[in-house]
Amino acid sequence: MTIKIGDTLPDATVLTMGPDGPQAVQMSDKLKGRKIVLFGLPGAYTGTCTMAHVPSFIRNAQALADKGVAEIICLSVNDPFVMKAWGDATGAADAGITMLGDADASFTKAIGMDFSAPPVGFIDRSKRYAMLVDDGVVQLLNEEPGPGQCDVSGGETLLDQMG
């Protein structure tokens, strides 16, 4: 079942790079009692993700914070080593965006945002989306119709919807 507005996000263990290497992060800890933006994408270092999606949240990070967003989280079906390197390379880390790896796609599958495209090597990857979540409940949700598109899931669109 695909997640929708009004649903509570499930808990899952995802990964980040801590000071001593990969570190488990509980999604429930990130969500509880906080307003966050969560955006998912097909893969680190891919064209649309690197050139459009991540930059849209870098550009809008301060404006989102001004609207009460405590954290912006980028989630991809990649390992935490790749997510850290990509966050550093794109400037997302410097902008305060949290880069999390859903290495086994468990969270992505649990919210129904997974897809596979074997011809390009994408197996159990994340669809492109962005959501505003308040205390674990989805308030706004924007899913792209295709993985190479970044129109409705960009930072500007979410910011405009927040009013």
Image (cartoon, rainbow, N blue to C red):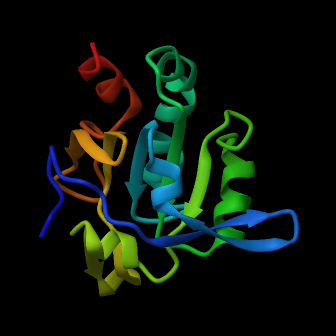
Which residue is rendered at x = 51% and y = 14% of the image?
66
| Side (left or right) of 17 relative to 41 | right
Which residue is rendered at x = 54% and y = 37% of the image?
71
- The number of numbered discs placed on residues in the rendered structure image is 0
Viewer-nearest residue: 36 or 155: 36
| Side (left or right) of 41 relative to 16 | left
Please provide percent x and percent y for residue 14: 54, 70
Viewer-nearest residue: 40 or 44: 40
| Side (left or right) of 73 relative to 154 | right
As drawn, which residue projects farthest toward the front?
Answer: 33
| Placement of 72 over or under 102, stated as above or below | above
As drawn, which residue projects farthest toward the right?
Answer: 20
Please provide percent x and percent y for residue 97: 61, 41
Viewer-nearest residue: 124 or 111: 111
Q: Quadrant of the N terminus?
A: bottom left
Which residue is rendered at x = 49% and y = 34% of the image?
57
Please provide percent x and percent y for residue 144: 22, 49
| Side (left or right) of 113 relative to 34 | left
Q: Quadrant of the C terminus?
A: top left
| Placement of 74 over or under 118, stated as above or below | above
Which residue is rendered at x = 52% and y = 51% of the image?
30
Please provide percent x and percent y for residue 17: 74, 65
| Placement of 13 over or under 45, stated as above or below | below
